[in-house]
Image: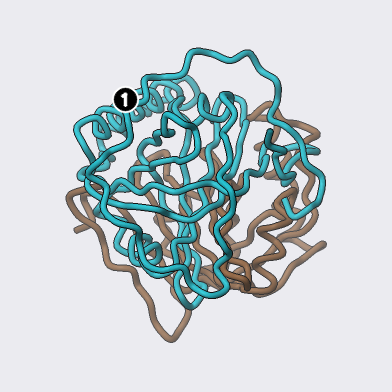
Chain colours: A brown, B cyan
Amino acid sequence: MATARSAVRRAAEPALLPNEIKPAMQGAIPASICTCSLDGIPNATIISQVYYVDARHIALSCQFFNKTTRNARENPFVSILMIDLESYDEWYLEARYDHSETEGPVFDNMDMQIEAIASLTGMSGVFKLKSADVYEVLAVERRSPTTG
Amino acid sequence: MDRQQTRKPAAKPTAPVDASPAMDSSATAVMGEQQPGTGAATASLLLPERLVELLHGGNVLVVGTRSEKLMAHVCRAFGARVSPDRRAITVFLPKSFSTTPMANLHGNKQIALTVANPADHECYQFKGETTSEGPVSPDDQTVSDLYRTKLCAKLSRKYSNFERFFDHFQPGPLHAVTFVPREIYDQTPGPNAGRRVEMD
């Protein structure tokens, strides 16, 4: 981590998620997110799932984190950190909230994964998916000593 | 967490708190000036022993900051140290990934720190304003090294090969950032998630 870092890729166009990021989205280790309210107070929390929608979009599960949800709706720019338990690399994302889904394939798939994660973590019955919040990815950074 | 209800931290037995060296006297001056709209300083909170235990206990530490344009930024901290009077928290940020958070803190001082126990998911968030930053002292470095060892041991019980992760992912040189919490929120998954912690 101290030896190197890759540049954050920012562009006018949304960033593309590489295939190598997918293992970090399997929910093995919970991810972290920071949002910011319009009055300038950051909010950092743990999230159980970051779902790969397509190469330009992710979805976050909306369950308990009301402040995160409210912040993202009033100030859509968020920052996310994930760990890939296969490579032990860390992935840093910047994203912009786009819309929420309460039905359809993304919601259904996330609902199933949430239940699986809850079961694995001994929290069955605690997690309840309220919506799948879809974000457009703006920047991607892979943090690994090997990525230069 | 935006609800009005308040609660006290779960009444768990208080274990001995890890050694907490005195605050680093090498910390530099107050970071930046109070910015309009960033919240006036309030009376500092006396952190409950239970939360001190969590902060010193080798749990996951996540730091949130924001830019002047309200762009949020998340990063990990490698250790935390509560001041002897239990009114301030110092976190250690890897220099290699803290350019943005340090610039954010210099600009507006707003910081959020979340501590999460990966074993039982107990989780709290502290919000406040930074008061100082500076290089880590030898005591700070010891705290950070101990933190990494504790976290590795805790995660290794849950995930395989986590020792390899920590061999691979070392924090390197650190910044020490001190802040005074003014609000604490329970973020443990469940019915109390988001509630503000009532302080004595």
B97 in relation to B147, above or below: below
Q: Nearer the viewer, residue B133 or B157?
A: B133
How far from the left and from the top, in percent, is residue B94? 29, 48
B66 in relation to B143, above or below: below
Q: Residues within 10 Å of mark 1 (few under 14, many from 20)?
A: some
Give the left or right position of residue B190, taking residue A142 as reference: right
Quadrant for residue A102, please give it. bottom right
Give the left or right position of residue B20, taking residue B1 as reference: left
Read off the chain for label 1: B
A42 in relation to A86, above or below: below
- Residue at label 1? B146
Q: Amino acid at mark 1?
A: Leu
The number of numbered discs placed on residues in the rendered structure image is 1
Residue at position x 22%, y 44% in the image? B26
Quadrant for residue B138, please give it. top left
How far from the left and from the top, in percent, is residue B77? 39, 44
Residue at position x 47%, y 74% in the image? A138
Q: Quick one: which residue is furthest to the bottom in this view?
A: A12
Residue at position x 62%, y 71% in the image? A39
B71 in relation to B44, above or below: below
Give the left or right position of residue B86, taking residue B135 as reference: right
Q: Nearer the viewer, residue A82 or B46?
A: B46
Residue at position x 28%, y 40% in the image? B169
How far from the left and from the top, in percent, is residue B154? 45, 22
- Mark 1 residue element: helix
Give the left or right position of residue B192, taking residue B145 as reference: right
